[in-house]
Image (cartoon, rainbow, N blue to C red):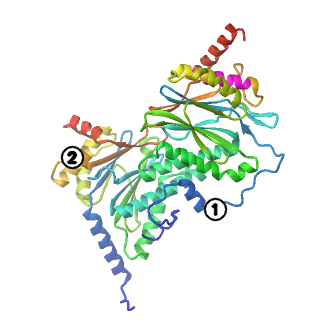
Amino acid sequence: MFQPYVPPEQMIKDRSEYARKGIARGRSVVAMEYAHGILFLAENPSATLHKISEIYDRIAFAGVGKYSEFEDLRIAGIRLADLRGYSYGREDVTAKTLANAYSQALATIFTTQMKPYEVEILVGQVGDTPGENELFHILYDGSVADETGCVAMGGRSEDLADHLKDAYREGLSAEEAIGLAVGALSAVEDKGVEPEHLEAAVLDRTRARRKFRRLSDPQLSSILASRS
Amino acid sequence: MTEPARGFPVPSYPLGANPSFADLLRATRPDGPEIGPAAGVGVPRGTTVLALRYRDGALMAGDRRATEGFAIADERIEKVFPADETSAIAIAGAAGQATEIVRLFQTELEHYEKVEGDRLSLEGKANRLAQMIRGNFPMALQGLVVVPLFAGYDERRSQGRLFRYDATGGRWEEADFHSTGSGSLSARGTLKKRWRPELGRDQAIQAAVESLFDASQEDLATGGPNPVRGIYPSVWTITSSGVSEVPEEEVRAAFEAVVQIAREEGG
């Protein structure tokens, strides 16, 4: 079959554009460090198809974009973490290892597959002190950013980041962090966000071994009601 | 589906992700031929464990001794382990093999929960454990027998349930109580006398401690409570609020009550 020569710059540009468009169609996820850990909040009309998930004791995952693709990555991450933890020790499983593996995998897919993955993912790890938290933001082409404070990704990530940047400060309580994140989501969507259309989870360092905990709709509603 | 992502252990399955960690482990690292120890090589073996149902759920207990031939290998070994937040496993038999099976089983349950976003049903957990014990059968033939008891709180039925196993992976549900290991016969004798439907927590702990105490009198491989060195049986409760170890003071108090009754009866 005849294949026209496409310069690498052009190929990368086309693929990036394709991936960005796919991601921009989806809804957003916000991650935010607060006093006791890291909060993840997503706009998600489904109560069962999650965007946020537990990976290991201290590590959580969040994905935006195409569900089948970030679900693939989520399961691969759980497999990697559980195999590592079983072969070595539980404390030897780190967000850094996972971020590297995700970065490698996404970079390979970006250049070698028919189409790039239309996803952005976050890998968060809660530390014993706020200074030891880790947040890695990994893009469709495998580039990694090490973030602190708060991160937004997905469709309206730039607007969200603008809203969050001004209001965010260190040492927020869980309730304040949730209020801030929901406020930012409502502001960029220009409408109120119903608690049943939100998915929220925390990595809470005060918990025992498994730090990940989902917040139920009633819990979210009562937190939001008490703040408004 | 896309090709396996680089750096990740992703076995390819026809449809859907396989939520089993044990299968993943086998696919990533195929085992060599299973070789047990030559005859006459001693390995530590755990002895008596028991489980019973009571009002709030289920209770599991084990003595603290491991033996190697006629020698005591360990006086403080643990034989009861939480499997996840609503179930526990107690193991008698080859101690090294047993702890490995427990670790694999714990990872298996957590892995399933994370991949699927749901916990396995209690029935599902019990069946999975049976398959893992069956997987150990080649080793059992070479003397490394592992015989567990499994107890969990069934959230769908709101009650505790017990399962016992044999070395071939046979699985039976027990309605009230069971014990396994070298001292299990005399432990079960005492349990039979003491067990009532709807036992309270304190009575259930006392019945478990008395059964293990009686087993230690009849079986030289079962360790009795040792007040001098502060060694008491480990006792765990499995209820709607989770799996938790009974504090040592409570176990000691239960043991002292048992001794007191024995004195009064002139035993």
Compared to A210, does B203 lie above or below?
above
Parent chain of label 2: A
Quadrant placement of the C terminus of chain A:
top left
Residue range highlighted in magenta: B208-216
Compared to B53, does A2 lie above or below?
below
Name the spot of residue B84 as percent of width and height, x first: 51, 41
- The disc label shown at residue B171, or none: none
* Residue sitting nearer the eye, A208 or B50: B50
- Reading the image, the residue beneath label 2 is A194
Compared to B38, does A17 lie above or below?
below
Separation of disc 2 and disc 1 at Cα?
Answer: 49 Å
Magenta stretch contains residue B214: yes
Looking at numbered disc 1 in the image, what kind of residue is underneath it? Pro
- Reading the image, the residue beneath label 1 is B30
Looking at numbered disc 2 in the image, what kind of residue is underneath it? Glu
Q: Residue furthest right?
A: B40
Same chain under badges 2 and 1? The reply is no
The quarter of the displayed image where residue B251 is located: top right
Crowdedness near tag 2: few (<14), some (14–19) or many (≥20) residues, C-alpha within 10 Å: some
Which element carries disc 1, helix, strand or loop?
loop
Q: Residue furthest left?
A: A190
Name the spot of residue A190 as percent of width and height, x first: 15, 53
Mark nearer the viewer, 2 or 1:
1
